[in-house]
Structure formats: C-alpha cells, structure tokens
C-alpha cells in the first residue's frame, strides 16, 4: 500500500515594503538634521563634547576660531568619496544635504536658543537626540556623514553592527578629548556617547535597514 506524501509547508512570502516617496525622504532629512543640530547645541552650551566626527569638530572649534558648523562640514568632505564608491550616489547626496543642514542649524540655533541644564542631563539628552536622528536618517538611506558612513559601510559589507563600530570610534575621540577638555567633562560626555550608541545598536541591525 502506498501512502501519499504531504509536501512541506512553506512560509508565506512577505511582500517588500513600498519605497519612501521623495516627500517622505525630504521630511525625514529635515527631522533627522534638526535632531542632530539640537544635540550639538546642547553639547556646545554644556561645554561637553561628542563622539565621532562631531566630537572632532568640537575639538577643532575649541582650539581654533573655526565655528562648530563649519568644522563639522569641512571634516566630512573626505568621507563622501567612500559614500559614493560603496553606498551609491543617492546615499552620498542625501548625506551631504544632512551634513549641510546640521552644520547650519548647529550655528544658527546657538544664536537664538539658550539652554540651561546640568551637564550630565544635557549629554544624555543630546545622546538620545543623536541616536534618534541617526535612526531617522538610516531608515531613509542617509547618514550624518563622517564615521557614520564608515560604520554603515562596514555593516553592509561585513555585518558589523553600526552602533558597535561607532562606539569604538567614539571611545578613541573621547581619549583624545581628555587632553583638551579634562576628565570631568569627558566623563559627562561619555554618558551621551553610551546613550547614543545603545539606541543605534539596539535598533539598527544588519539586514534590518539596507542602503541598496
């Protein structure tokens, strides 16, 4: 007697989500850039620093007469070649727009807004804003430039979590900052760095958001 075999059940295919519209992308770039600009304002007025290339920009602005926004924009320029080569023109152009908006907002907001809060609270809130801003930009295939481009590239190519890559680079910047702002402000700044990278690491994983 022969018995009929039942074919193995297959999981239903999940349709790909529809792409973002140009208007949705534009709105996300503005929102993400505002969150980043606001975070840089909090850090600047608290006398603290940030990780990543923004942290390098803080150090440059503190040691030279170059404004923070200008330093942030110029330091990002060398990374656009990597963005174009590895992640495509669309990613590079969106990132350039975000960096330009963030640079302008970081300088303009400082002339119209004054924030007073304890330094640790300021760094924690800034780290949260930076993390949320990065997630908004990543979701719409953009970044805040600099080390974010490198972290995004390493995640896409090797599967390394962008948050952990960013955290490693941030720690290097914090060690350099010890010689400029002192250990008290560096410790306070580390609170924001940890908050930022935990937000990114927990929410931005390989395969969840892709550039291509």
Image: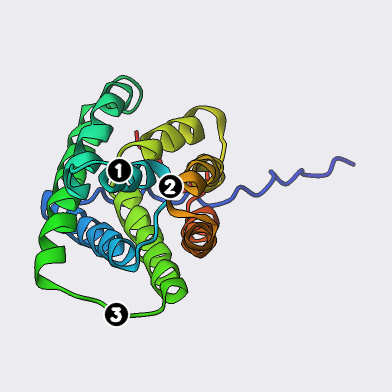
Q: Is residue 103 left or right of residue 18?
A: left
List the single residue furthest toward the right: 1
Q: Residue at x 33, y 23 (%)?
A: 82
Per the model, the C-alpha gap separating discs 3 and 2 is: 23 Å
Tell me the crowding category of disc 3: few under 14, some 14 to 19, or many 20 or more residues within 10 angstroms, Cα based.
few
Regarding mark 1 in the picture, which secondary structure is present there? helix
User: Is label 2 in contact with label 1 (beta carbons under 8 Å)?
Assistant: yes
Residue 84 on image: x %, y %? 26, 24
Residue 1 or residue 85, whichever sits in front: 85
Tally of numbered tags: 3
Task: Give the labeled residue for mark 3.
Answer: 116
Q: How has the structure been colored for display?
A: rainbow
Residue 203 on image: x %, y %? 49, 58
Regarding mark 2 in the picture, which secondary structure is present there? helix
Residue 168 on image: x %, y %? 56, 42
- N-terminal of the pair, mark 2 or mark 1, is 1
Per the model, the C-alpha gap separating discs 1 and 3 is: 24 Å
Q: Is residue 122 left or right of residue 28?
A: right
Based on the displayed image, in which of its 4 quarters is residue 150 positioned? top left
Residue 123 or residue 15, whichever sits in front: 123
Residue 24 can be seen in this image: no
Q: Residue at x 42, y 46 (%)?
A: 209
User: Is label 1 in contact with label 3 (beta carbons under 8 Å)?
Assistant: no
Quarter of the image for the C terminus: give it: top left
Q: Name the mark nearer the viewer: 3 or 2.
A: 2
Task: Give the labeled residue for mark 2.
Answer: 180
Q: Is residue 81 above or below residue 150?
A: above
Q: Residue at x 23, y 29 (%)?
A: 77
Q: Name the mark nearer the viewer: 1 or 3.
A: 1
Quarter of the image for the N terminus: give it: top right
């Amino acid at each position: 007697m022969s018995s009929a075999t039942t074919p193995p059940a297959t999981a239903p295919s999940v349709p790909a989500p529809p792409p973002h519209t140009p208007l949705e992308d534009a709105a996300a770039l503005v929102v993400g850039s505002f969150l980043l600009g606001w975070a840089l304002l909090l850090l600047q007025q608290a006398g603290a620093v940030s990780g990543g290339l923004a942290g390098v920009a803080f150090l440059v602005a503190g040691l030279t007469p170059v404004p923070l926004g200008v330093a942030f924009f110029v330091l990002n320029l060398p990374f656009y070649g990597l963005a174009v080569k590895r992640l495509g023109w669309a990613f590079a152009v969106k990132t350039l727009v975000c960096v330009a908006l963030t640079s302008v907002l970081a300088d303009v907001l400082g002339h119209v807004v004054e924030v007073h809060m304890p330094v640790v609270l300021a760094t924690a809130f800034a780290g949260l804003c930076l993390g949320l801003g990065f997630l908004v930009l990543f979701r719409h295939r953009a970044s805040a430039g600099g080390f974010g481009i490198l972290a995004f590239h390493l995640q896409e190519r090797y599967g390394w979590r962008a948050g952990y890559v960013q955290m490693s680079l941030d720690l290097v910047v914090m060690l350099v900052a010890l010689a400029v702002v002192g250990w008290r402000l560096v410790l306070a700044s580390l609170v924001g760095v940890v908050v930022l990278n935990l937000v990114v690491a927990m929410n931005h994983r390989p395969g969840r958001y892709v550039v291509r």
